[in-house]
Amino acid sequence: MAKSKGNKETNGKDGNWFKRHKILTGILAIIVLVIIVQAAGGDKDSSNAGSTGGTSNASAENSSDKQQTVGLNTAARDGKFEFVVKSVKCGVPSVSDSTGYITKSAQGQYCLVDISVKNVGDKQQIFMENDQKLLNASNVEYSSDTTATLYNSNNSDVFVNEINPGNTVEGTIVYDIPKDQTPVTAELHDSSFSNGVKVKLQ
């Protein structure tokens, strides 16, 4: 009898853990699935590589390694996506959803990056906000805060989104960076494995 009771308690604990973490488990499962899909079919070639042939490809690869750099409100392409960074606002202490009841505070400061993403390819491509990075003057890299991006009332379609050819999504990606740091560059990717394109933020 005692042995049976012990097994019951152990099973109960396991069940309760999964029940209490349904949302977190679901989000993580989606992210892992998207990464696997991108690994299998993501566009690894930068838009700078536009021609074929040995010499042309070598030149394109050298150009991709250097990464094209543009400024705010200027179209920048990487793979199937054309990005436009419209504005950057730092020094934000917290973000809230549209109701104002769900709020998340920054560890340091939030930087809000307003962006549009257009699929300029010939088939659908999945956009992921956590593939997009910010860099300071010393090239220290900052990843997006996924939870804050979800909570932010203006996140729109820039969390995880499948974009068809010719369609554009817009929204705000949220980054949590130290208060004494200033982002100077955004590095944008059409997938986790693409070369990326850089946008000057100042």
Image (cartoon, rainbow, N blue to C red):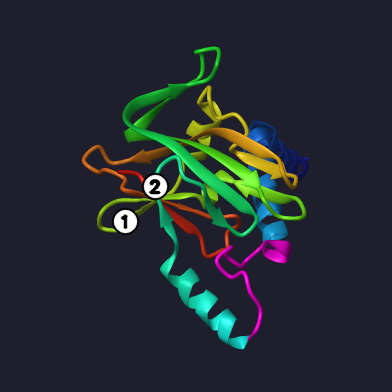
In the image, residue 8 lies at what x, y percent?
75, 39
Q: Secondary structure at mark 2?
A: loop
Assign the C terminus to one quadrant of the image: top left
Q: Secondary structure at mark 1?
A: loop
**Residue denoted by label 2:** 71
Please tell me which residue is depicted at 33% across the width and 26% down the height of the picture.
93
Q: Which residues are magenta?
A: 39-53
**What main secondary structure does the magenta stretch of the protein show?**
loop
The type of residue carrying mark 1 is Val
The type of residue carrying mark 2 is Gly
Q: Does 8 appear above or below 139?
A: above
Instruction: Using a 10 Å C-alpha cutoff, classify the residue at mark 2 as few (fewer than 14 neighbours), some (14 to 19) or many (20 or more).
Output: some
In the image, residue 74 lies at what x, y percent?
46, 45
Q: Which mark is residue 157?
A: none
Using residue 114 as the reference point, say whether residue 42 is left or right of it: right
Q: Nearer the viewer, residue 187 or 181?
A: 187
Using residue 156 as the reference point, say whether residue 121 is left or right of it: right
Please tell me which residue is depicted at 63% across the width and 44% down the height of the picture.
118
Q: Does 133 appear above or below 16?
A: below
Q: Nearer the viewer, residue 84 or 38?
A: 84
Please say whether residue 145 is one of the residues in the magenta stretch. Answer: no
Q: Does 82 appear above or below 97?
A: below
Q: Which mark is residue 140?
A: 1
* Res. 10 in view: no
Q: Nearer the viewer, residue 147 or 52?
A: 52
In the image, residue 76 lies at what x, y percent?
51, 52
Please tell me which residue is depicted at 55% across the width and 30% down the height of the picture.
155
Please tell me which residue is depicted at 52% across the width and 76% down the height of the picture.
61
Instruction: Using a 10 Å C-alpha cutoff, classify the residue at mark 1 as few (fewer than 14 neighbours), some (14 to 19) or many (20 or more).
Output: few
